[in-house]
Image: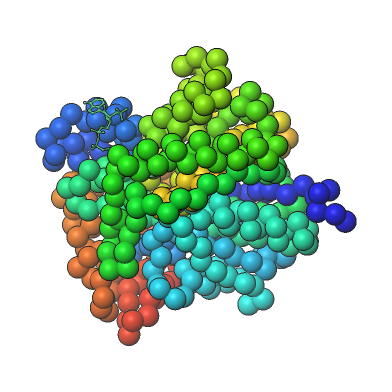
Amino acid sequence: MTTASIRVGIDDLAFATAHNVLDLKELADHDGIDVGKFYVGIGQTQMSVAAEDEDIVTMGAAAARQILQRHGTTGIRTVLFATESGVDQSKSAGVYAHGLLGMSAHCRVVELKQACYSATAGLQFALGIVARDPSERVLVIASDIARYALDSSGEPTQGAAAVAFLVTADPSLIEIESPTGLFTDDIHDFWRPNYRSAAVVDGKYSLAAYLQSLEGAWGEYRSRGGVSFGEIDRFCYHQPFTKMAKKAHDRLVAITESPLDAAGRAAQIEDSLTYNKQVGNSYTASIYLGLLSLLENAPDDLAGERIGFFSYGSGSVSEFFTGVVQPGYRSLLRTEHDRQVLDARRPIDYAQYRALHEHVEAVRGGDFETAAQTAGPFRFLGVRDDMRRYEAREAQ
Ligand code: COA
């Protein structure tokens, strides 16, 4: 069989988020500013805040567990864990998740890093593995806790979430098309040296770099035979904050000289923003949370529609590609469950948020035990003898 004849893509997609939620009104009141700057200006209403006993591993495993409960583990010989907020310089967060999920030892597991972009690298690598052997299935987990310094301008654009998706032949959700367009540029718009728990960011520069990368990736996508703007029905962008997706889409409309009016532009992206507005930035997970949001919140049946994806990771690497929504996809969604997960988060006030933020720095570099604050399927117990310890609350 030639690779050209194999349809490959995303067969299932699930998400998890942190236990707590902070309404950005709490932050605006603390800062003494109009909350309109957050609700409207950057397009964020809330952000998920991790409890002491959760991290990227527990969230990633909680997202992946839903996939494995439905599809089993047969044929999964690769787990790709994409994250900016890795918990170890050497051991992949994916190996911890693999253990918690009780997966087969006959599996390759690695962590991928390039700011918010690496889940898309995971998707593309997975497509290659499946195209070579269509009996294989690849589990991609993207999980991040977006963390900026207290009292910095990046603070309202924090958040936390994980998505997991299964890449297979004959996918049931989205067939991913070729070609793709790539753009890499060695810049410092957002980065995090090893000794820091919060990102360093040049916010305004990062916005400009994102838009320049979009132009570069789109240009290469078209030069490699990609379809025209008018042949794409919806768009799904990396969302450090949801206003960024609007800015990006406006830029793409301008580049392509599309006659689309403001309402037409909004209709192409607005359903992809619903979940991200409430979760905040989830770095690597953000664009795929946007995809889940689009699939679960669009009132129309999207089967047959083509989605344009723009994935951006500061530093920077970006990619433009497309996928087609598959017939019958709606029966695979977990819409009620996902909305309930968002609604079930524990509201916290500014003081509680600040204490959790400070806790991360306070326990860095030594052994500690976490307080039991969450009720999810997996818990982060703390660090003993420099080893991170986790618990699965029930057998997987
Ligand atoms: N009501 C409505 N809108 C308001 C407002 C109000 N009361 N006050 C301000 N705004 C608008 C501004 O006009 C601006 O909108 P615009 O960008 O469309 O012009 C927006 O709110 C943000 O205001 P700004 O003064 O630019 O905010 P800031 O200096 O605090 O910085 C970020 C905002 C996003 C740059 C900052 O939060 C940041 O650095 N975030 C992290 C960086 C990031 O995510 N980068 C992307 C990496 S891919």
Horizontal arrangement in the rendering, residue 111 relative to residue 70 (left or right):
left
Percent coordinates x, y for residue 21 in the rendering: 31, 46
User: In the current view of this chain or complex, which residue is farthest to the right?
Assistant: 1
Whether residue 134 is visible to the viewer of this picture, yes or no, is yes
Percent coordinates x, y for residue 47 in the rendering: 32, 44
Q: Nearer the viewer, residue 249 or 390?
A: 249
The C terminus - image quarter: bottom right
Q: Nearer the viewer, residue 299 or 315?
A: 315
Residue drawn at x 27%, y 64% is 196
User: In the current view of this chain or complex, which residue is farthest to the bottom?
Assistant: 385
Horizontal arrangement in the rendering, residue 16 relative to residue 181 (left or right):
left
Q: Nearer the viewer, residue 287 or 384?
A: 287
Percent coordinates x, y for residue 147 in the rendering: 30, 54
Counting every numbered tag in the picture gives 0
Q: Which quarter of the rendered image does ligand 1 occupy?
A: top left
Residue drawn at x 81%, y 49% is 4
Percent coordinates x, y for residue 23 in the rendering: 27, 39
Horizontal arrangement in the rendering, residue 103 relative to residue 239 (left or right):
right
Q: Is 321 located above or below residue 301 in the figure?
A: below
Q: Is 179 located above or below residue 259 in the figure?
A: below
Residue drawn at x 55%, y 41% is 217
Whether residue 396 is visible to the viewer of this picture, yes or no, is no
Q: Is 220 located above or below residue 135 in the figure?
A: above
Q: Is 96 located above or below residue 121 in the figure?
A: below
Horizontal arrangement in the rendering, residue 29 relative to residue 255 (left or right):
left
Residue drawn at x 43%, y 72% is 391
Quarter of the view holding residue 357: bottom left
Quarter of the view holding residue 343: top left
The N terminus - image quarter: bottom right
Q: Nearer the viewer, residue 340 or 238?
A: 238
- What's the image's color scheme? rainbow
